[in-house]
Amino acid sequence: MCPTARSRSSAQGPPRSGGERKETQFQNLDALYKTLQDEDMPPTSRFSDRLVLGKGPVHARLMLIGEQPGDQEDRAGLPFVGPAGKLLDACLQEAAIPRNRVFVTNAVKRFKFAQRGKRRLHQRPTSDEIVHYRWWLEQEIRLVDPAVLVTLGATALQAVLGKRQTLGPLRGNVMCWEGRQLVVTVHPSFLLRLRDASAKAVERSRLVSELGKAWAMSEAAQTLSPWRNRNVPTKDTN
């Protein structure tokens, strides 16, 4: 188990013009997302105009964090509905994890892309662009209040920890972050890029195992952690 989360300055809002911060305290995800939609501007012209917000039970015990929405997510306005999302769904099913009991979101809330003819090709966000959305991600985590976080890929890990890390040595590890357990693994898109079938099968098995471990820890937290013993709303976001 992780120690209780220390007090954070979560009431301070995101940087404003001139570097000042406004005091903000959101009571629920709807309020957070409305403010994000009202105030956020794309960091650069390479980002889509559309925000893609988190989806899942309001107080899910398990929260999965990816990098950013892709082309299909941007068009649908929902996270993890493209090829990587379909693979994630299959891995969750293989690990016997009910998809409707998991909250999914992304570290960066807009699709960053390069236009190539009619195609929009994924572009990895920079550290500054990750920082741009980090405060919003922290608020999202605070409001969902999961017992266990899973970072899918290096960008999500950097967004949560606040610094760049080499994912390989940390993969599969369980860390403590702000009173929560954090499981580090790869993004499903990593598997999609593998050409060797045997390597892909091995990596898929590892991902399923890591997701299963996170789910088991989140289920155990129902009785081990006092803040889990509460009435959990069944309403999903979006």
Image (cartoon, helix red, strand yellow):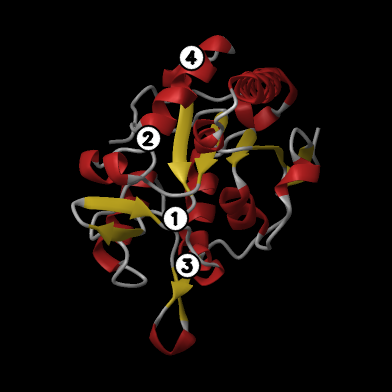
Residue on which disc 2 sits: 55
Residue on which disc 4 sits: 98
**Residue 108 numbered mark, or none:** 1
Q: Quadrant location of the C terminus?
A: top left
Residue on which disc 3 sits: 129
Point out the residue furthest to the front here. Answer: 196
Q: Residue at x 62, y 18 (%)?
A: 201
Observer-side mark, 2 or 1, equals: 1
Mark 2 burial class by Cα count in 10 Å: few <14, some 14-19, many 20+ = some
As displayed, is residue 114 above or below residue 145?
below
Element class at badge 2: loop
Label 1 – label 4 distance at C-alpha: 25 Å
Asked whether the viewer can see residue 57, the reply is no
Task: Check if mark 2's residue and mark 1's residue have beta carbons within 8 Å.
Answer: no
Observer-side mark, 3 or 4, equals: 3
Earlier in the chain: of badge 2 and badge 4, it is: 2
Task: Check if mark 3's residue and mark 1's residue have beta carbons within 8 Å.
Answer: yes
